[in-house]
Amino acid sequence: MESQHRVVILGGGFGGLYAAKALKHAPVQVTLLDRRNFHLFQPLLYQVATGSLSPGEIASPLRAVFRHQRNTQVLLGEAVDLDAERRRVILADGEIEYDTLLVATGSGDYYFGHDDWKRSAPGLKSIEEATAIRGKFLYAFEAAEREHDPAKRREWLTFVMVGGGPTGVELAGALGEIAHDTLRRDFRSIHPEEAVILLLEGGPRILPSYSPDLSAKAEASLIRLGVTPRTNAMAIGIDDAGVTIKTASGTERIRARTVVWSAGVRASSFGEVLAHRAGAELDRGGRVTVNSDLSLPAHPEILVIGDLARFEQDGKPLAGVAQVAMQGGGYAAKLIVSRLHGRTIPPFRYFDKGSLAVIGRAAAVAEIGKLRISGLLAWFIWVFVHLMYLVEFSNRVLVFVHWGFLYLTWDRGARLITGPDPAFEAQPEESPVAKL
Amino acid sequence: MESQHRVVILGGGFGGLYAAKALKHAPVQVTLLDRRNFHLFQPLLYQVATGSLSPGEIASPLRAVFRHQRNTQVLLGEAVDLDAERRRVILADGEIEYDTLLVATGSGDYYFGHDDWKRSAPGLKSIEEATAIRGKFLYAFEAAEREHDPAKRREWLTFVMVGGGPTGVELAGALGEIAHDTLRRDFRSIHPEEAVILLLEGGPRILPSYSPDLSAKAEASLIRLGVTPRTNAMAIGIDDAGVTIKTASGTERIRARTVVWSAGVRASSFGEVLAHRAGAELDRGGRVTVNSDLSLPAHPEILVIGDLARFEQDGKPLAGVAQVAMQGGGYAAKLIVSRLHGRTIPPFRYFDKGSLAVIGRAAAVAEIGKLRISGLLAWFIWVFVHLMYLVEFSNRVLVFVHWGFLYLTWDRGARLITGPDPAFEAQPEESPVAKL
């Protein structure tokens, strides 16, 4: 074993997970390092934030995923530095040697330089943030129920999503459903359906990465769910009492006690380590420019995939979506094996399977090639795609029958290290590894 | 409505929940106040701590439970004081008037005066503690996997439960299963089945409230699961590096990185409020001595039930178990209605339906009247009893089919305010209300 080619993968998100999986039968020794002990199915994180799913239902313990893959070792830890010459990843408390390094540390929330906004407006990148947002949402209704001053009650019942991309749309849609359906009969003093749910988008339309007609359809669906989309409304200030926006007609203050950030992400800070230690070039978003085979120009033995990589295809950089990371992971695995056999393979090419965004129950928008679908059919496609993914990695769909069954099976579904664990408290919030 | 008799219930645990439920058709106006927005099915909390269940699966949002009970209002809040003369509960930010006050604030962990032990050895009373313990358990295996020093590795793989009552037994049994079955193939450097799981009991046998032969059977079952029960072993010191115990042969130091407290509870501190404001008498455990109808001697309009009440029956105080609280809640509701009609009812009498403790999969002990059962049959009884309870309150057993179904139904299963929510951070850890 010791003489085998050693592949070290940083990050157990979509890219790292797929790469490790794809190396299952390769004559290599794989070490998958992540700061968390689980793979998170991030596309459903908004459902945790809105109370539909429990954290355990969208997270798979990495050890369980790789239990039967004997050439793969999972390690819980954080990469803090790199010695590219001696080919070692430096951890907080040790080192790991590699022959090939695959960096898949993803991206995190980015507040455009206003890091103080984070305290008032959490993003939606981790389990902890999702449960914090869930708590904020639900607490707001509770506080409104007890508040007698109509103006203050209004502030509790105003919810603002900053950023009209898929995350903001999904979150706003789900919150609209909560207010109008789930909680409708739960309160005595307030009417949850009077909640104001604002979706702020700085640009001229929501879902800017989709076609204009799908943006319009998504907007109509959101309005039906009680959400108010506001375009050309750029957040210029966020604090605990609300959001200040800049519109065509000037600035405006929106008083709200609950604000969620869904506007910007930035590549993981391990990109900077690669810049300093391996001569990588970063773009404005902190992404690492890679060769056509996803390797670093100065270090062909270092590959970068997913949100952290800047890869131009047909003149445009690829987006930071799960599909890009997964395909990058698959390509990287193939490249590693080919190199071992002295073969070459064609450059990486992303195959766009389409985009999907869901807007509440039974409504979604999808772009698959030239096809544009909205409504129930798009929603069914969305459910199917996500169920397939979950089934592939954890069998959860079948396992979650109910606790009795769960108890009788030999697997435990919720093996997560999360929350205020003393072992993690000392670590910085923004970490180079596995910003999943 | 305003002229109706106002019942205020403090605490949404077993006692408060059953009392409110039993008042469904009574001509009263019920306010149920709890610090949390959910009822917690505490007997299964150890399964959250061991990763079998997600928090959402054993917690029901109180608002959902009382959605259709029109005479009942749920409020999120904390009772900090009492004005017994003016019949008002004082909240941190307001007051609630009552005609009858039902105090069901339960009990919390008690470290026999060593509150500094809490930091190293969390108890198992809340969702947050359960997920913290889960994190500690799982992190210990991860740390052991990365540790090369055999002695230090040993410390990571030593788990100590302090207290051999039902909670300690259930936790130790489940951990034994995790180490021997669930995690068996998950690691590359360590053998999880080499974990040392110690169950410390100060007295001469574990499960002291059960009959001696059931204690012996439970001990045998635990040993089969890889747990080492140690009786006559009293913890006299706990810190981050381990536990010091006093045994017949002197003191002994057990080096362990993971210690859980399951030894003592103490009645909620709202008992002291009742002592100062309503002349209540407290026993050594902080419990409030009540009349034969569960009322306070000096204030018949204040009733105390569950873990907070000291009620002697046949010369012995009733135990702090769910059944006592539930029956107390039912009795209190009946008493309130009877008084409204000017009728009297016989004193409260607890009917002992039996005791149950589970020791891992397919093993349990049960005492039902003179009947003593152990093994698989006892386990089936345990599963049945717990399933019935969960079904009654939330339909979870049926709802939890899987996330797809959950998504299609109109209920959201995980509506909990939990974790590091800013709205709760400022509150003291030990709170008078709803130490569920």
Image: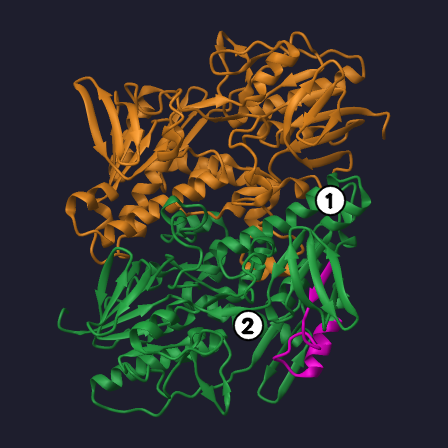
Chain colours: A orange, B green
Q: Nearer the viewer, residue A340 or A61?
A: A61
The residue carrying mark 2 is B384
Give me the residue at 51% from left, 84% from top.
B352
Q: Nearer the viewer, residue A257 or A415?
A: A257
Sequence-first tag of 1 and 2: 1
Q: Tell us which disc is closer to us: 1 or 2.
A: 1
- In this rendering, the answer to whether B263 lies above or below A21 is below
Q: Which residues are magenta?
A: B197-220
Q: Return the x and y of residue A107 as percentages of the image width and height.
A: 51, 25
User: What residue type is disc 1 on?
Assistant: Ala
Left of A209 or right of it: where is B73? left
Calculate the distance from the C-alpha at mark 1 to the C-alpha at mark 2.
Answer: 38 Å
Query: Which residue is situated farthest in the left direction here?
Result: B3
Q: Return the x and y of residue A13 as percentages of the image width and height.
A: 58, 31
Left of A78 or right of it: where is A222? left
Q: Secondary structure at mark 2?
A: helix
Q: Return the x and y of residue B269 as percentages of the image width and height.
A: 41, 67
Image quarter of the N terminus of chain A: top right
Q: Do residues under tags 1 and 2 come within 8 Å of each other at their CB atoms?
A: no
Q: Is residue B42 something one can see in this rendering?
A: yes
Give me the residue at 33% from left, 38% from top.
A173
Instruction: Specify the label residue B144 is tagged with.
Output: 1
User: What residue type is disc 2 on?
Assistant: Phe
Q: Nearer the viewer, residue A131 or A375?
A: A131
Residue B199 colored in magenta in the image: yes
* Chain label for disc 1: B
Q: Nearer the viewer, residue B318 or B413?
A: B318
- In this rendering, the answer to whether B312 lies above or below B100 is below
- In this rendering, the answer to whether A393 lies above or below B395 is above
